[in-house]
Amino acid sequence: MSGTGSIAEVGTPSARSRALAVLRVRSRALAVGLLPAALAVVLVSARTTGRLAGDPWPAVTLAVCAVAAFVLLVGGIFAAVVLRASPAMTPTVPLSESAAPDLYRLVRDLADRMDVPAPSAIALTPDCDSWLEDRTHAAHRRARGRTLISGGAGGAAGAGGPESEPGAAPVLVIGSPFLWWMRVAELRAVLAPVVAGTGPSAHPDIADARGFVRGLDAAVDVGGRRFLGWIAAPARLLLRLCRVDAAEMERGVAAAASDRAQGVDYALRIVAQEQVGLAYAGWDRLLTRVALPAWRMGRWPAHLDAGVVSALTELSRRDRLADGFTSRLGERPACDLLDQPGAVDEAASLLAARLFHGGPAEAGPDWSPVDWAAYPEEVVDRKWRTEAARLLAALDAVSAPSVPAASTVERVLTHLADADADALAGRLSGDLAREAVPALAASAGRGADALPLFPLEAPRSGRDLLADHVVALVCCAAVDSAGGEPGLDWLDGPVLLVAGVRRADLAGPVLSLVEDRDPGPLREWLAEVGVRPEKPVRLV
């Protein structure tokens, strides 16, 4: 293992000097807090020796001692909060060494080659990124809803562990899509500059400065959420004073880590970075177009990482710029470094549903996993029939039929050809907003960290929602009367299959009906496929 000299060298003079500047802010804050106490000691000593006799010194001494005691009390509370507050931790899927011995071996080999300390542990994040995360700030940490993977068994992550012991190296967090899409050599090349960052992390001055900044950040959060509201103000002030130096310190650390990793798989890293961009594009499409429809109905795809391989393979096939990428699939995938990749994938998929949609941290009756083979029947078909039922209910509300109306495509065709689609679109928007209220309330009840971190889909107009619902109704009719089948496209999500062929030409005729009140193109499409618009559609 590397010695102290090499670790200090990795820290670089620039990063170390910035760390010392951060620590000077802490020292000055401590000096300001101790100044009244020092003055009180001087006054008491002078009074005891008789050098400050007579008025008004007794009253002055008493007042200064009272102020000093108050400042020490407040400063002590503030220091305790900074030292003990747990900074916000990224929810991850921790991997024990028994669950991924080959991955641990690869990472340790990287650390040895670069002469830096090995990470204390490895964890996965359901995103396309990798970083080092220090988890040693406090002795006791909240579990934050993580899932522990140890030898293939799932359970709740504990608050402690080797990574939280004082002086432990940071945890290496790896984007789970990388493990499934990248080959072993590519993952090694991508992780090299990340692992190299453990060297600067081990430098005492840099580690101390980082701990101080993290403590201040956590204190701001504590001050905003609890009765100690006054804590936030001095914490924010100190953060402002050291913000520039802290940012420059991190830049210096990143530059040093990059330089240290230059000699490790540098040529391969350029190719591997192309795979990072491709993985990000495919992962985003998979989440927004495939996972999101399932999440909204209380189902979560249990193997998102395996799905991203299919999505990226399809993207490579369609995109001429990606020619040749699929030939990589004959090489050993990085997920082979895990003992039970299926169990890890399931845990990462559940965490993705929690982070990006706000779902529960555990499976339950209303939050159950779905396999890819069952996705068309259990998600796509159900999604279409739910939307068809919502469309017909909204049509009942705006048209107020005197007798129960039939659930047919013909009824919607006639209405949109003869009436302003805006009323129906507005009704749908309102119904969807009302349906979302209980889900948001349930998510909020699970705590602030259970809410989705990122909105996966931008708000849509009423006309767009109406078009989607008309498409869903037509797809239901095609399944019921024309031999159609629900299908899954890895990049576009739910699709209609007729005679085993995807029908991607439905959106245009539907838009002609919704936007131009022209039913002709859609009637031609229905006739071509063999859909009988007058036949009732089976709803949920």
Image (cartoon, rainbow, N blue to C red):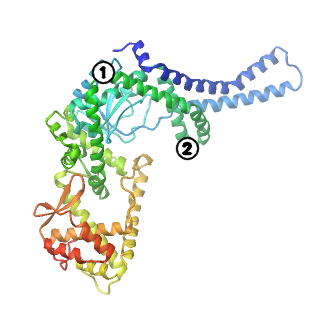
Is 196 displayed left or right of 492 in the figure? right
Q: Quadrant of residue 140?
A: top left
**Outermost residue toward the left in this view:** 499
**Element type at marker 1?**
helix
Q: Is residue 37 above or below residue 94?
A: above
For marks 1 and 2, give the CA distance. Answer: 46 Å
Residue 208 coordinates in the image, percent (x, y): 50, 24
Task: Judge whether residue 348 can be spotted in this image.
Answer: yes
Q: Which residue is mark 1?
A: 263
Is residue 283 positioned above or below 426 on the image?
above
Is residue 458 placed above or below 272 in the rendered structure?
below
What x and y, as percent, mark residue 362? 31, 47
Mark 1 burial class by Cα count in 10 Å: few <14, some 14-19, many 20+: few
Amino acid tagged 2: Gly
Q: Residue at x 59, y 26 (%)?
A: 26
Along the line of sight, the residue nearer the viewer: 329 or 439: 329
Q: Amino acid at mark 1?
A: Gly
From the image, tell me which residue sits under label 2. 224
Per the image, label 2 sits on a secondary structure element best described as: helix
Discs 1/2, front:
1
Nearer-the-camera pick, 262 or 223: 262
Q: Which of the 4 quarters of the picture holds residue 348?
A: top left
Residue at screen point 82% across, 18% down: 47
Rendered-image quadrant of the C terminus: bottom left
